[in-house]
Image (spheres, rainbow, N blue to C red):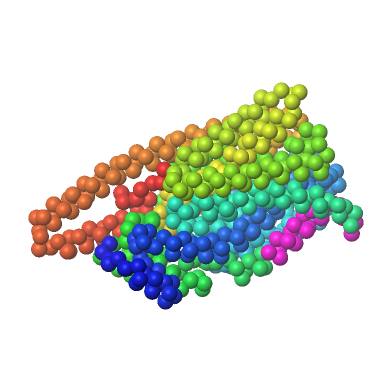
Amino acid sequence: MESTLPSTSASTAVADEGRIPPDPEMASQHDEIFTANLLRRVDIRLVPILSALYLLCFLCRQNIGNAKTYHMLTDLPLTTGEYQLALTVFFLAYSTFDIPCNILLKKLRPSVWLPLITFLSGVVTISMGVVKNADELIAVRFILGMSECGLFPGVAYVITMWYCKKEAQFRQALFFCAASMAGAFAGLLAVGLSKMDGLGDYEGWRWILIIEGLLTVLVALIAFLLVLDYPATSSFLSSSEKAFLLRRLEADEFGEEEETLSREEKEKIHAKIPKSKIFKAVFTDWHIYAHIFVFWGISCPLYSVALCLPSIVQELGYTSTQANLLTIPIYLTACLFSLTTAYFSDRTGKRALFIAVSYSIMFIGFLIAAVRPASVPGLAYAGVFIAACGIYPAFPGMITWASNNLASSGKRAIGMAFHIGMGSFGGAMGANFYRTRDAPGFRLGHCLNLGFVVLGGCGIMGIYWSYGRENEARERRCVELVEGLESRVKAEKSEEEELRRAFLVEKEESLAHEGDRSVWFRYTL
């Protein structure tokens, strides 16, 4: 990229005239403060409201576990099998409708779609608080899965539309920390709201569901005014700031911007991609299926713990209130581990390494819980505590690693929805790991989680090896292509400009039509 670097005084003058940004290359070399300030403004506008929406939706899906500790099964009444079915059907619906939801996201815009599905989740949670029997509970949980399924893949996709690859995991972790904070708040709120037992002839567990549903509805209504769409349509950025963000995202995904091709020419090339080709690229990419195994290695432990942790702790001999309060330190610590891991993963640009470390922590934790002596029940709590400190850092790392290696944006939208949808089936499995008849040891549940951690670990190794091998092969092929171009230019010097332009057009067409399968694309390791 050819450009003239501004002097310090010129740069200051530019900043004083309305923060007109430099191009991406100059920003990285001479104006990193501007970039950091701009991203900070985006962070403030984007991350808090998305985190709040996810916190409340996660609260809506897991508060049934807290409600169970306050006699929900005996009040309805509900058998253990019916309760497990209510947990399972949520994930069947949640996993089935992810792809249609991400298609609707692009049609309706994030500022409409994300608050809408959060609002619906709150309404359904309120309905769950007034069910009269098992059939109604199971039906409402299925509808809750339908209403919530679009939020996580939608937010994960929106983050990729604002941040470069090396900036994404920390933001994903901030967003996903809402899940661990939801676990902490769920225990605290359950203790407080259970005191409303008998108010309006409603049991305490009903008030837990109703109040948390009402809170979700309220925040969702506010979110219609706060959620952002995409950089190109944002109202809080100037036109030059929008252009700057779009340029740096393009350079991050496809390499430094070539000035030989105009933005209009590039957009025309990328607009030619048919939808059928995008779907084919998603469903024939074996890496996505391998990433689903990695997802299961996290989602099975995640949801088995999130839904059953209060019951697991209660079976160790604690009261309902003590059990719910003892879940809070686990979630708070897991949140800190998640943010720390994401920070260093973004700083180093490495994904697989930090996911593998998190997997190792999960393995150690569930191993301790599974093999502990029956005479030391506290080790079960310690084991799950340790495992949670691996689960929560691994989740945003896994999502970011998959999204970093999906291109173009069309494939990323569909691919992430497919990845998250299929990966969420792990929740349907994990919800049934900790059965009442296995109490108080729950060794079967701990061993099943261990098995899925091993499965996911094998997936990490296979993907890492494949990405590394493919990057090396593509590097060699790119060198050959560039050497071939230089040979043709040397032989036909009079047509140098036309040859180089044709080469750039072919490169752009390869990136547009082949995406992450293009020889010019490099996988993030």
Task: Please name the residue shown 50% across and 40% down the image.
Answer: 354
Nearest to the observer: residue 279 or residue 404: 404
Nearest to the observer: residue 376 or residue 474: 376
- Position of residue 233 in the picture relative to residue 502 (left or right): right
Task: Please name the residue shown 49% across and 53% down the image.
Answer: 168
Q: Position of residue 151 (x, y in %)?
A: 59, 57
Residue 68: tell me if it is visible: yes
Q: How many marks?
A: 0
- Give the position of the C terminus as an image quadrant: top left
- Position of residue 152 in the picture relative to residue 70 (left or right): left
- Position of residue 235 in the picture relative to residue 377 (left or right): left
On screen, residue 107 above or below 99: below
Task: Report if residue 97 lies within the magenta region.
Answer: no
Nearest to the observer: residue 455 or residue 331: 331
Task: Indicate the quadrant where residue 200 lies.
Answer: bottom right
Residue 513: tell me if it is visible: no
Nearest to the observer: residue 264 or residue 242: 242
Task: Please name the residue shown 47% across and 49% down the image.
Answer: 346
Q: Position of residue 416 (x, y in %)?
A: 50, 52
Name the main secondary structure of what is drawn in magenta.
helix
The outermost residue toward the bottom is 17
- Give the position of the N terminus as an image quadrant: bottom left
Q: Position of residue 128 (x, y in %)?
A: 76, 55
Task: Report if residue 204 lies within the magenta region.
Answer: yes
- Position of residue 509 in the picture relative to residue 290 (left or right): left
Task: Please name the residue shown 39% across and 63% down the image.
Answer: 31
Q: Position of residue 176 (x, y in %)?
A: 59, 51
Q: Which residues are magenta?
A: 200-219
